[in-house]
Structure formats: structure tokens, C-alpha cells
Amino acid sequence: MSHLSERAEAVQLWLEGDWTLAYRKQGNKGWRSASLVRRLKRDRACATELDGWEALRELAGAGVIETVSPVSARQTLNVQVTLSEALRHRLESEFAELDDSLGLEAAQAAVWRHALDGVLQDWSVTDQQRLAEGLRAMAADLPHAYAYSAFEASARYLLGSSKLLMALPRELVRSFGIDTTAFRGTSAWVLASVPAEPQGLLLIENPQSFEQACRVCLDERWALVCSFGYGLSLGEALRAPEQVRLIGERTSSCTLSELLALPEVTFWGDLDPEGLRIFLRLRQSVPGIQLSALYTPMIERLENDAGHPLHGLTGKAGQRQAGSWMRGLDQEALDDTRVAELGDKALDESLAEEWLARITDPYEEAH
């Protein structure tokens, strides 16, 4: 459906769902175009009847539906509409049994059926019933329920699971009228050590290296913030820094937003493809961020003694390689002297670009 407009995709989803519900009871299903566009508007598959006519015209042109005469908003002929033979065969071959007790509407039935072939594949009818009831209850409590975070709303309405709402296919949740982006954002708690008047900010990937930087008193000159790699999703936090709270033994009244506005902001993590991918993601939110000069001795050591393989025993199982780059060096390899000496400096720009160029996938920096 990727070649269709969003409007046509929504109508196709509704048609598939309505066809599925009817197929279980009476076999094939067809519609009359005039009454169909009224139902599409009533069920919010399209905003207006005009949108419904235009969506039908687009779907007919794409071969998704078949009509005995052309359909358009200018010629609102009441013609017979059926799904194309190819689409009917696909739906029949993929058909997953929907229990009547779920009480699903047409658009909901289509995406639910797809979910039964995916994330809901092993779910019992009882749990499916509880999920459908929970989604309906959540939808009925909108917009009040948006005052919760997505995790809180999920745990309160969906089988007591805080993760279920965001794990469900977005189109399934949306079919109940729920917008997952509208829930209250949650605060991210980030470990930090900040002097009264910081000269710069160093973002550190791992807590052990954060502790080392504090031990050599780097936090007397620079603000230190520990990102905890992907665990804390600092990249997401930096897209909404006003929701980030700094914690630690030494924190000033500065906010993360204020720290990110300092003249120098650098990042120090592991020297491996995933470590630099973290940097590239952070750069999407903080364009002026640079790699720390602490990478200089790490690069020298990796080039001299080859570091370690990206392997399960080194904690790098599943890490995506970058071309022929298959070895790494962890940031904990640096001694205190080098951390104190280089922790408040940025890596030479040409050297930084040379190593970033090893992440050759154009997807990396676009996401």
C-alpha cells in the first residue's frame, strides 16, 4: 500500500476489515458506492464523503477494488464495489479467525487480523478479549487518559502491562482512536556532576568512565553527564531536554538545556562502530557536538594492538559491523592521567571525520 495516499490506505484498511467480518458469516462481500462512502465517513475512515469518493477512485486506479463503472466525486454514481480478486485471494489465504466476542469494528478487525499473524499470534481468545476491552476503555476515557504517560496508561488499561501499548502495532491502536504520541512525556533521570561555572559539557557513555572522570576532578572545570549508552536513550532525551532531570552528588542549578548551550559539548564512548553510532544519533539533536580528544589515545592503542573482536565474550554480541571494521576498544581502557589531560578538549576534526567515515551506511546519520 506504500504507493497509495494516506487517505486511500485508511479506506483500504477499512474495506479489508469489513470484508473480513462479512466473510466469516456469509462468504464474499460487496458494497454499493453511495452507501459505502457514508459508512466510511461515519466510521471515520475518511473525513468527508468527498474524501471517500476520492479514495475509492484512487483504489480503483490501483487495482485494489473493482467497479462496473468509474467512481469519482464528480460522478457520484451508485455502483457495485468489490475487492479485487487478487486481494480477496490474499485475504482468504491469510485469514485468521476473529472471535465474535471481541466486538471489533470493521477497521479494527482488519488490523487485528494482521496482528494475529504477528504480535498477537499466540494470544488466547480470553487475553484478546481483555486487550480489546482495555483499548475501548482507554479510548472512552480520552482525553483524560492522555494525562498519563504511555507506560502508566498501558499498565492501567491493558492487562497491567506498562509496555503493551507501545508494543502493539500503531495502526491497531489508532483504529481505536488512540494517539500514542499524545500521552504525557516522562522525565528522564540522568547522572551528572556539574561545577558552579562549567566551561564545557562532556557526555560519557558508560558509568564506570563517568566515575573515573569525577575521580580525576574533571568535573571541577567541565560538566559531566553519563548517557548509559542505549539503556537510557539519551538521544531521545536530548530531543526534549526540558524533561531531563540531573541527579548526582554534585549538581548545580543548571538544566540540561543550559549545559547543551555551553561553548563546547563533546562525547566520549567506546571506540567501536556502535559507539560512534551513538555519537551520530546524538548529533541529530545537538548539531555542534564533537568527539572528545579522549579518543586520540584510544585510536592510537586500537591501531597498535588491535583491541578486541566484536564478540559475545567482549559484550559486543549482535553489534553491527561497519565495512571491514570488526574490532574495538572500550573507553575504560584509558588511565587516569590521559582522562585528566584530554577530558576537556575535542578530538582533531580531521581525525574525527576520518573515523566517522568508517560508518558508511547513509542510514546511520539520517536516523
Image (tube, grey):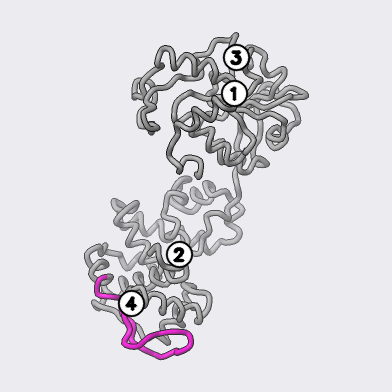
Do the residues under discs 3 and 2 have CB atoms within 8 angstroms?
no
Residue highlighted by disc 3 = 339
Identity of the residue furthest to the right in this view? 197
Front: mark 3 or 2? 3
- CA distance separating discs 2 and 4: 22 Å
- The three-letter code of the residue at mark 2 reads Ser
Which is nearer the eye, 258 or 264?
A: 264
Task: Report which residue position mark 1 lands on.
Answer: 347
Q: What is the x, y in percent for residue 190?
A: 61, 31
- Give the mark nearer the N terminus: 3 vs 2: 2
Mark-to-mark CA distance, 3 and 2 = 53 Å
Query: What range of the chain is rendered magenta?
Result: 66-86
Relative to 117, 40 lies left or right: right
Residue 217's image quarter?
top right
- Decide: few, some or many residues near mark 4? Use Cα within 10 Å; few <14, some 14-19, many ≥20: many
Magenta span contains residue 366: no
Disc 3 packing (10 Å; few <14; some 14–19; many ≥20): many
Residue 72: within the magenta? Answer: yes
Image quadrant occupied by the N terminus: bottom left
Three-letter residue code for mark 3:
Val
| Residue at which label 2 appears | 175
Secondary structure character of the magenta stretch overall:
loop
Q: What is the x, y in percent for residue 169?
A: 41, 55
Residue occupied by mark 4: 65
Left or right, 228 with respect to 133, comes to: right
Q: Amino acid at mark 1?
A: Leu
Q: Secondary structure at mark 1?
A: loop
Q: Say which of marks 2 and 4 sits in front.
A: 4
- Residue shown at the point (32%, 68%) measured from the top left: 100
